[in-house]
Amino acid sequence: MSNTPKVARNAPTASAIDPLDLYSVRAFLTEEEQLVQNSVGKFVDEEILPIIADCFEHERFPRELVSGIANLGLLGSSIEGYGCAGLNAVSYGLICQELERGDSGLRSFVSVQSSLCMFPIFAYGSEEQKQRWLPQMAKGEVIACFGLTEPHGGSDPANMKTTARRDGKDWILNGAKMWITNGSIADLAVVWAQTEEGIRGFLVEKSFKGFAADLIKHKMSLRASITSSLFFDNVRVPEENVLPGVIGLKGPLSCLTQARYGISWGVTGAAQACLAEAIEYTKTRTLFGKPLAATQAVQIRLAEMARKITTSQLLSLQLGRLKDQHRMSPTQVSLAKWNNTRAAIEVARDARDLLGGAGISVEYVPIRHALNLESVITYEGTETVHQLTVGRALTGMSAF
């Protein structure tokens, strides 16, 4: 098993530049933000990294880590009250970055629980719904999933086929959702469906008759994450389980904006892990009488990785500051998700190549991160969707 260098925790001096933080982004963090990064980084180093390669290889979600994640206050960390930590947006970004340095599957778990499930209950739920669900979700006692993507396609949520119709004081839900993180271990599903009034959000409990979740197996990506299909066959949902505060696409799209923000930070953690491994490996691998790291070709490739990571770090930090000032726009999130995920997958692929034959082994991190990022670059909006979102902002015309 490789001993990948840990991410440096101290601000570097001018003569000791941190190879994973060339622009000293950490120096611009508040004391609280640094403490958050340190705490999560320590958890990743001590609890996630020792087991995650085995989990990935054997397609197992490490559910035993959920309590530790919850105890650190990482679930719903940006929510005020209801047993949540009330951290700022930059802190949430750092949480995602450190978790994804461990594995995209763990960051996905926290993203879904926090941004896609706790956020809509907090933003659009009744006070009764908030009191019932958020404290339990913050403790990890209730795990949730987000039901939006459907089997026929994911990039056009307005065309969803899942429907809900009124039946007295209840709703009858029918349809299916696909590629749902946490689905088969979820106690609660936040499901979006077409109604006569427009798209509505429903809190579907796992005990509801007619609701089923099937585990999707044989994945070659996000293997340490639960992915499922959800099925709704005349599921009766009481009125008190309907989110009252939003109707229309604004509901699910606002959730996606929150999740995409976290992804824009998270993927940089994966890229940092790959660069750290590539540096260590090329320093110790000797060919033709000298270390690989002493060659021009390898140094140029490592420098390219560092350039991409640095650009991503600066984009994410500015995005986080804008979010904390309530000035962030979905277009800005699209640019960061597109740029940073593309950068991360390129870093992971190149690091895999630099490791040669060792690069295809899960004993080293690049192949695992490269395979995971194949999913991350697709979910929460494909690269093309984000490019067209930016293009629309530039021209004022929609090409969707």
Image (cartoon, rainbow, N blue to C red):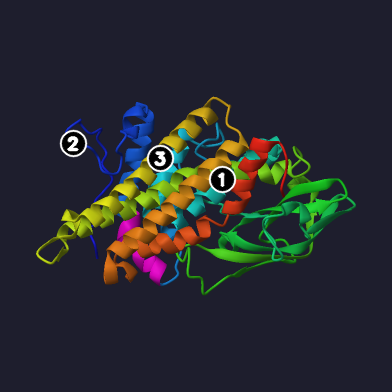
Q: Nearer the viewer, mark 2 or mark 1?
A: 2
Q: Which residue is mark 3?
A: 311
The quarter of the displayed image where residue 55 is located: bottom left
Residue 68 visible within the image: no
Front residue (pair 4, 56): 4
Identify the amino acid type marked 3: Thr
Between the C-alphas of marks 3 and 2, the distance is 20 Å
Q: Residue at the location (60% across, 53% down)?
A: 384
Region in magenta:
47-57
Front residue (pair 329, 65): 329
Left or right of 127? Residue 341 is left
Front residue (pair 99, 168): 99
Between the C-alphas of marks 2 and 1, the distance is 35 Å
Q: Nearer the viewer, mark 3 or mark 2?
A: 3
Q: Position of residue 138 (x, y in %)?
A: 52, 44
Q: Which residue is mark 2?
A: 16
Which of disc 1 and disc 3 is earlier in sequence?
1
Left or right of 154? Residue 325 is left
Q: Residue at the location (56% across, 64% down)?
A: 227
Q: Nearer the viewer, mark 3 or mark 1?
A: 3
Identify the amino acid type marked 1: Ala
The quarter of the displayed image where residue 174 is located: bottom right
The stretch drawn in magenta includes residue 185: no
